[in-house]
Amino acid sequence: MIEEIYNYRQLLKSNVSKEIRGKYKGSFLGVLWSFVNPLLMTLVYAIVFPFILKSTQPHYVTFLVIAILPWNWFTTVINQGTSCININGGIIKKVYFPREILPISIVTSGLINYLISCLIICLFLICSGLGFSINIIFLPIVIMVQYILLLGIIFITSAINVYIKDAEYIINFFVLMLFYGTPILYSPELFPENMRWLLNLNPMTTIINAYREIFYYKTNPNLKSLFVVFIFSSILLYFGIKIFKKLKKGFAEEL
């Protein structure tokens, strides 16, 4: 599969470029929406949430931005990636190319958008006086773990969505519920210690915590927990590829 994708690397490159440019094609702000969307989300939560839970978290807006941006990458990829095979049904029925390119393009373009929007994190860290620390060297590791996790999920959901048309809506609802089960608006310390294991069942909890540990708390991420998520994500990716390869044989007929 890797060899085949390498042979079609120009198609992969152009598809990633198309995903990035096409997302905001025709809009006035264009790629600036990568900055505006998470900022608007942060503004709403920063105004409302402290009044709901009486949050006294220092530099709360920066605390939020650090978590919302990778979560935005997660949700955007899940929403677009789940339907990527169906959307490209016309091309799939006419032209041969490695179908794996489609989900890989979605995850990779999401990664590039996330890296661009990281400028927002830098801006908030500077303006809040928190600044940077040497712990930022762990950032590529956290990004890699999230990338592998997303690839594993999208290989499965995009393939299943071809055969089960309602899967897209069920998955989107699940992701919406998962938002509140991930420590984005709040710190995990708000949960009783004997209940935190429930949060930790969610791999995005470890990933979000790792981002905060690097940017906000300026400590090393919990490498043990991150390694567990890496192993889980790698296994998920392995089975995701297996499922995708088995189901892709019937894509043209189903579409």
Image (tube, rainbow, N blue to C red):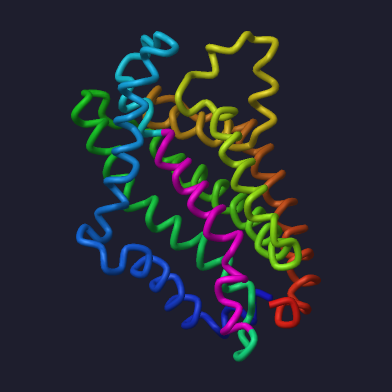
Residue 136 lies in the magenta stretch: no
Q: Quadrant of residue 16?
A: bottom left
Q: Position of residue 35 (x, y in %)?
A: 28, 47
- What residue sits 64% from the left and 31% below the top? 224
Q: How many marks?
A: 0
Percent coordinates x, y for residue 74 in the rendering: 52, 47
Q: Nearer the viewer, residue 117 or 176?
A: 176
Residue lying at 63% horizontally and 72% vertically, measured from the top left: 100
In this view, 230 is above or below 178: below
User: Viewer-proximal residue, 181 or 112?
Assistant: 181
Residue drawn at 39 percent across, 58 percent down: 112
Q: Nearer the viewer, residue 36 or 236?
A: 36
Residue 88 included in the magenta stretch of the image: yes
- Name which quarter of the figure residue 155 lies in: bottom right
- The quadrant in which the N terminus is found is bottom right
Quarter occupied by residue 72: top left
Q: Position of residue 139 (x, y in %)?
A: 44, 42
Q: Can you say which quadrant of the picture contains the C terminus?
A: bottom right
Please state the extent of the stretch shown in magenta in the rendering: 67-92
- The answer to whether 17 is drawn above or below residue 202 in the figure is below
Main secondary structure of the magenta stretch: helix
Is 164 situated above or below 114? below
| Side of 191 relative to 245 (left or right) | left
- In this view, the residue in front, 211 or 120, is 120
